[in-house]
Amino acid sequence: MELDGKDLKKRKSILMDLWNELITIWESNPQKISREYVIERLKGEYSKEGISPIRGASEPKDLFDKELTSLYILGKYGMGLEVQYPEFFDKVFSIEVKMDQVNDLLLSDNTDGLRDKVSAIIGNVDGNSIARILRIPLTKIYFGFSNESTIKRVADSLKKMFPEQAKEVNKYIKFYAAFKIANDIDIGKIKNRITKEAFKQALALELNIDRKSLPSDKYIMKIASDVFKVSNKNLKNVFSFNNKKIQKEKQIKK
C-alpha cells in the first residue's frame, strides 16, 4: 500500500510518539513496562486521537492486544528498536515476535517439517493464531515495509501446512481484501463505483480467489467508515447506500 492516507500518517505519528514515551520510561523505570501497561497506553492514545485499531466489522475483546502488532511492526521495521531494546521486545511483544518468526518460516523455501516447526513456536494453531499470523504481513504491507504478495504467500503456505484451517485463512484474506480496498478509497485511488469494481476484479486475480470470495460492498464500506473515517460524501461516490441509515448508525455509536 504505497501511499500514505490521512489514517496512516496519523497512526504512524501516534505510534512513534508512544514509542518515545515508552522508551523514556523503560530507560528510567523498566519495571513499570508490561504488555498490559502498553495495551492501556495504546488504547488511551487511540481513544484520544479518534483512531480505530486495524479491524474488520467486529470488535473482539482482544482487539487492542492484537493491535500491539502495529506498535511492534513500526518499532522493529520502521525505527530499528528491536536491536537497541531486545529486552523490551521480549517482555512486551513475546506473541508478536513468535508470529513474526512463524511468518519467516512460512515464507522460506524449506518446507521440511514446517508444520511441526510452526507448532513448536506457537503451540496449537487455531483461528485466533491464524489471525495473529496474518496480521503481521497485513500490518507490514500497510506500513510500507513489505510488498503485497507477502500475505498471499503466507496464506498459501498456511493452507498447505494446515489444511484444516483453510476456512480461517480464507476468512482473513477476505478481511485483507476489504481493508485494502477501504485503504485505497482513503488515499484516493478509488473515487467511484467503476474504479472500485475494477480494483475488486484485479484483487481477485492478485490473491487468486474467485469473485464470490471477495468482500461485500457493505463490509468494505464499514471498514472504510469505521477504521479509515472516510466521509459519507466519498463513500456515496463509491457505493450505493442509504445515507440516512449510515448517519443513524454513526450517531448510535457516539
Image: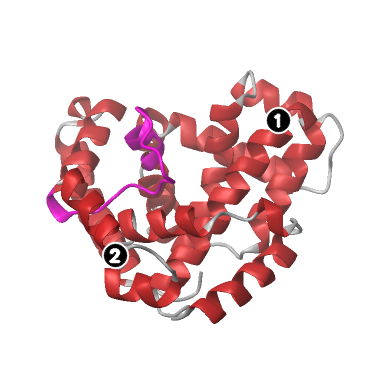
Q: Amino acid at mark 1?
A: Gln
Which of these two is toward me, 26 or 54? Answer: 54
Local SS, label 1: helix
- Any magenta on residue 140? no
* Residue labelled with disc 1: 165
- Rendered residue at 34%/75% (across/down): 234
Observer able to see residue 144: no
Region in magenta: 48-67
Amino acid carrying label 2: it is Asn
In this rendering, the answer to whether 52 lies above or below 7 is above
In the picture shown, does residue 152 fall above or below 134? below
Residue 142 image offset from top left, x and y in percent: 47, 61
Q: CA distance from mark 2 to mark 1?
A: 38 Å
Nearer-N-terminus badge (2/1): 1
Lateral position of residue 88 relative to residue 211, left or right = left
Q: Residue at x 70, y 59 (%)?
A: 211
Choose between 197 and 8: the one closer to the eye: 197
Q: Position of residue 212 (x, y in %)?
A: 69, 54
Return the residue found at the far top.
124
How many marks overall? Answer: 2
Q: Do the numbered discs 2 and 1 sit on residues whose CB atoms are within 8 Å?
A: no
Could you tell me what secondary structure mostly forms the magenta stretch?
Answer: loop
Question: Is 204 left or right of 200, judged from the image as shown?
Answer: right
> What residue does disc 2 label?
243
Does residue 42 show up? yes
Q: Nearer the viewer, residue 238 or 178?
A: 238
Say which element carries label 2: helix
Residue 88 appears left or right of 189: left
In depth, the one of 135 and 75 nearer the eye is 135
